[in-house]
């Protein structure tokens, strides 16, 4: 990506958590700065109502309408553990279809670069920690999300095949757990942070206890969607290799589920009964991922402190409750 040639960046999944994060950063960072818009760039944030990417014809029409020179492919069927366990085939098939249509069309239309989004859930269940970019295919994924994981892993295989057969500049990003404004707060499909924010909000509103499933001890790496947005923009402009990059805070910045719940209680200003249901399963204690490759390539990056990012996400939820994805009809 150069400063002089016109660029059209198409972000698929532009209405989701990560897409909205990129839209916010590209529109608020100073023009011409490392993460801000460049004068020669047009950014398009596509939604599923504009094109259902499971459909090849709709995908082609979307590309022909905007003629993107670059694509950040975020669109996916995404969900927490419960949804992943219940809809394995749909996770596999919908994601395979979307990824195949986007990559095939990008190759046909000679798109200069595509970054697709994987997830640390795609890593093998049994693997030596910390996770790094070389370990994706070293064993089967956890059985609870094998549909999603195999669909996403296949993107890395496709990227290599497109590069070798057609010389395409396709690559992928591997974020850890993301949170921020515009998250999915629907308790049926939400990830842990938006689910706990919504539960705490309801506990305060209904004057009921705030109960967190499990012991609260497991540790996770969470990345704020606005930080992740900057890392995607860096990868788009400054990284040209097929191998994926883990986009995450460091292993030393893991936080426990209890830390998360404590920060939510504070941000929601919840004063009622707050407890852990230790009869519920905890999941894996920790699954640390290394961000060494990222930091070496970028030359360092300042992540937003977790409590600050969480407070901003809670504020967004409270301010936007009526329009947020809460599952309420
Ligand atoms: N959230 C996380 O913790 C996390 C962690 C690691 C990786 N990721 C990855 O990050 C990417 C973005 O995730 P997210 O959390 O932003 O998800 P999200 O908030 O659920 O948004 C999903 C996006 O995909 C679009 N989409 C879904 N089905 C589509 C279809 N058939 N055709 C076109 N667009 C479709 C949605 O469009 P509409 O809203 O218009 O339907 C929405 O814009 C995904 O690839 C995901 O796997 C997420």
Image (cartoon, helix red, strand yellow):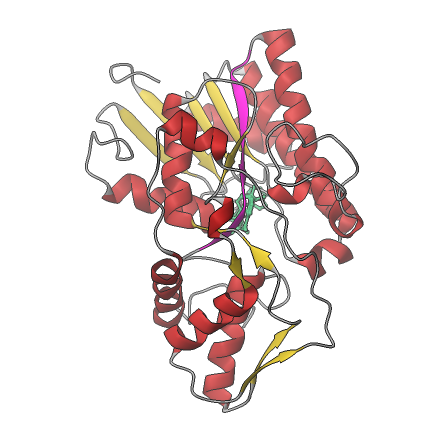
**Position of 274 compared to 88: left or right?**
left
Q: Where is residue 71 in the image (x, y as percent from the top left)?
A: 46, 28
Residue drawn at (43%, 24%), measured in percent from left and top?
A: 70
Q: In which quarter of the image is residue 39?
A: top left
Q: Is residue 268 magenta?
A: no
Residue drawn at (69%, 76%), measured in percent from left and top?
A: 278
Residue drawn at (54%, 46%), measured in percent from left and top?
A: 176
In-front residue for pair 284/209: 284
Magenta region's main secondary structure? strand
In-front residue for pair 263/210: 263
Above or below, 67 against 257 in this view is above
> Where is the C terminus found, in terms of image quarters?
bottom right
**Position of 140 compared to 293: left or right?**
right
Q: Where is residue 100 in the image (x, y as percent from the top left)?
A: 65, 28
Q: Is there any visible trace of residue 189 in the rendered image?
A: yes
Residue at the outermost bottom position: 207
Q: Where is residue 27 in the image (x, y as percent from the top left)?
A: 26, 42
Q: Position of residue 132 (x, y in %)?
A: 60, 33
Residue drawn at (35%, 29%), measured in percent from left and top?
A: 299
Q: In which quarter of the image is residue 216?
A: bottom right
Q: Is there any visible trace of residue 15 in the rendered image?
A: no
> Where is the N terminus found, in terms of image quarters?
top left
Q: What stretch is highlighted in magenta?
A: 168-179
């Amino acid at each position: 990506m150069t400063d002089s040639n016109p660029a059209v960046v198409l972000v698929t999944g532009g209405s989701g958590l990560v897409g909205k994060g990129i839209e916010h950063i590209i529109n608020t960072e100073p023009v011409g700065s490392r993460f801000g818009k460049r004068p020669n760039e047009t950014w398009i944030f596509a939604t599923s109502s504009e094109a259902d990417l499971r459909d090849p014809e709709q995908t082609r029409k979307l590309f022909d309408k905007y003629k993107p020179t670059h694509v950040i492919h975020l669109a996916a069927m995404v969900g927490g553990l419960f949804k992943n366990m219940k809809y394995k085939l749909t996770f596999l098939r919908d994601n395979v279809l979307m990824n195949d249509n986007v990559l095939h069309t990008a190759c046909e239309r000679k798109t200069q670069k595509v970054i697709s989004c994987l997830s640390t859930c795609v890593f093998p269940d049994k693997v030596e920690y910390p996770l790094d970019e070389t370990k994706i295919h070293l064993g089967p994924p956890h059985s609870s999300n094998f549909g999603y994981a195999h669909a996403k892993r296949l993107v890395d295989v496709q990227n290599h095949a497109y590069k070798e057969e057609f010389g395409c500049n396709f690559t992928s990003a591997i974020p850890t757990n993301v949170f921020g404004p515009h998250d999915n707060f629907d308790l049926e499909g939400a990830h842990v942070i938006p689910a706990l924010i919504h539960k705490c909000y309801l506990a305060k509103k209904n004057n009921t206890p705030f109960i967190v499933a499990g012991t609260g001890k497991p540790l996770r790496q969470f990345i704020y969607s606005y930080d992740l947005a900057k890392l995607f923009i860096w990868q788009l402009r400054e990284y040209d290799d097929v191998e994926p990059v883990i986009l995450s805070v460091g292993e030393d910045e893991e936080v426990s589920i209890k830390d998360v719940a404590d920060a939510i209680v504070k941000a929601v200003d919840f004063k009622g009964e707050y407890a852990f249901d230790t009869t519920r399963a905890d999941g894996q204690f920790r699954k640390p991922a290394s961000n060494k490759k990222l930091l070496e390539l970028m030359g360092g990056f300042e992540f937003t402190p977790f409590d600050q990012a969480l407070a901003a996400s809670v504020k967004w939820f409270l301010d936007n409750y009526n329009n947020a994805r809460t599952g309420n009809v």
